[in-house]
Image (tube, rainbow, N blue to C red):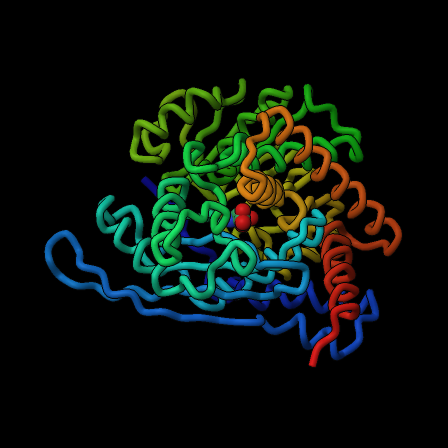
């Protein structure tokens, strides 16, 4: 089975450079002064830890872990922890900066951070994972804190890992501190609606964009690339609103059904098949990369960075791209996509539903109170819709694509706050 080949090397983009190139464009349009530009361009803190773990076979393996705090100008830094074999410092730096912009776009009182460990969770046992999460937490317990830096799940981590993190951090403090991390299981103070929050925000952004483009959801088709937490929830919620999701894909390939994939069935299949769609039969099998070039109205890249590269961009046929992943489009592809007249609901806007409900989780933990799912969804939908409208307005005002408009909204807010707070 043909796993997705990475794009040719010369076409690939370093995620930090990809972030910086948009940051530069937006800063120039905003007329940001050099001092603030220099403050925002550099992460506030970068920590690298080496984590020795005893593996199940008795051997000791040393993992490299990172936590990058890009900014704490708007408040305590916030951002997930990625466990993946491609994790490296440049990627974590870019993801941390994207968190700063994301929190600013949706107007929640957080700065941005990201963490990661270079490892392959698919090949690790439950015990090895637990030891790694606990050791990572111990190495960084002075960085984390409910008013300092608040981790959450990202690729390769989920509620189970957040529970271990919360427990290990609580041990270091001698008391239970559940607000130090979000994305926890419900019984440990997790929020209703958190698991589906990122996918739900993607759905809200997609519907808002479709309205602008006058695409009727009941007549629309959609392709979802990536079938992890974000992609599968986005697919399910879009399908519930009438959108026909025709192909879905993951690392094992793409699966096409012209009548629309039964998303519930596909999720069930994935959950009973070690987390992947390999062998899914209620659809036609296609090469994984082909999903990007399908003739659909909406394309949702919901896997990882640098998927829509410059060499692939001009073969895209969708009218709208809604970015569930962080950084799925390279900065060189931006220009091609804009010239083709394709609208993009960019990552720092479209996938901000996750961190928004993380914020609600943190608020509930601090209040010692639980909101209903209805309240969580209503409030996060409103935040997402308001953010979309604001970014759209700025894109019209500056005559720029939605991505640059989102950076303008974010940088403007962080820069203004920095000016008030001042520095040394
Ligand atoms: N990892 C998610 C993201 O990239 C969520 C972060 C959070 O909830 O803090 O947005």
Residue 201 at x, y percent in the picture = 63, 36
Residue 402 at x, y percent in the picture = 75, 49
Toward the left, the furthest residue is: 58
Residue 124 at x, y percent in the picture = 24, 49
Determine which quarter of the picture holds residue 398.
bottom right
Question: Considering the image in quadrants, where does the C terminus appear?
Answer: bottom right
Name which residue lies at 80% across and 41% down: 389
Question: Considering the image in quadrants, where does the N terminus appear?
Answer: top left
Q: Is residue 192 depicted above or below 262 in this figure? A: below
Name which residue lies at 71% across and 69% down: 24
Instruction: Please indicate, yes or no, whether residue 310 appears anywhere in the rendered image.
Output: no
Q: Is residue 200 depicted above or below 281 in this figure? A: below
Toward the front, the furthest residue is: 174
151 or 322, nearer to the observer? 151
Residue 137 at x, y percent in the picture = 37, 58
Q: Is residue 17 depicted above or below 305 in this figure? A: below
């Amino acid at each position: 089975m043909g796993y997705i080949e990475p794009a040719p090397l010369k076409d690939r983009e370093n995620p930090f450079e990809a972030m910086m190139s948009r940051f530069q464009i937006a800063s120039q349009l905003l007329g940001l002064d050099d001092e603030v530009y220099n403050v925002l361009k550099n992460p506030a803190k970068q920590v690298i830890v080496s984590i020795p773990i005893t593996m199940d076979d008795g051997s000791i393996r040393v993992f490299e872990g990172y936590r990058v705090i890009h900014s704490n100008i708007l408040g305590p830094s916030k951002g997930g922890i990625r466990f993946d074999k491609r994790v490296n410092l440049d990627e974590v730096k870019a993801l941390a900066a994207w968190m700063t912009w994301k929190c600013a776009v949706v107007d929640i009182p957080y700065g941005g951070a990201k963490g990661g460990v270079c490892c392959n969770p698919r090949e690790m046992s439950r015990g090895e994972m637990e030891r790694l999460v606990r050791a990572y937490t111990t190495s960084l317990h002075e960085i984390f804190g409910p008013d300092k830096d608040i981790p959450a799940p990202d690729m390769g981590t989920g509620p189970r890992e957040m529970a271990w993190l919360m427990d290990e951090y609580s041990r270091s403090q001698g008391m239970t501190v559940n607000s130090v991390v979000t994305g926890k299981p419900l019984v440990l103070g997790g929020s209703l609606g958190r698991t589906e929050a990122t996918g739900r925000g993607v759905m809200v952004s997609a519907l808002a964009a479709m309205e602008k483009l006058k695409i009727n959801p009941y007549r629309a088709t959609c392709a979802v690339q990536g079938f992890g937490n974000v992609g599968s929830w986005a697919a399910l919620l879009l399908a519930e609103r009438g959108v026909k999701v025709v192909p879905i894909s993951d690392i094992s390939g793409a699966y096409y059904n012209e009548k629309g994939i039964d998303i519930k069935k596909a999720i069930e299949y994935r959950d009973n098949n070690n987390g992947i769609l390999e062998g899914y039969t209620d659809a036609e099998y296609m090469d994984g990369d082909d999903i990007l070039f399908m003739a659909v109205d909406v394309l949702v890249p919901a896997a990882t960075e640098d998927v829509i590269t410059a060499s692939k961009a001009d073969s895209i046929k969708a009218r709208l791209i809604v970015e569930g992943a962080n950084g799925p489009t390279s900065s060189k592809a931006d220009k091609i996509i804009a010239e083709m007249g394709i609208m993009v609901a960019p990552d720092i806007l479209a996938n901000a539903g996750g961190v928004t409900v993380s914020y609600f989780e943190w608020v509930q933990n601090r209040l010692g109170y639980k909101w209903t799912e209805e309240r969580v969804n209503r409030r996060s939908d409103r935040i997402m819709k308001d953010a979309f409208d604001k970014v759209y307005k700025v894109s019209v005002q500056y005559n720029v694509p939605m991505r640059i408009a989102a950076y303008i909204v974010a940088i403007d807010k962080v820069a203004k706050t920095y000016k008030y707070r001042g520095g040394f």
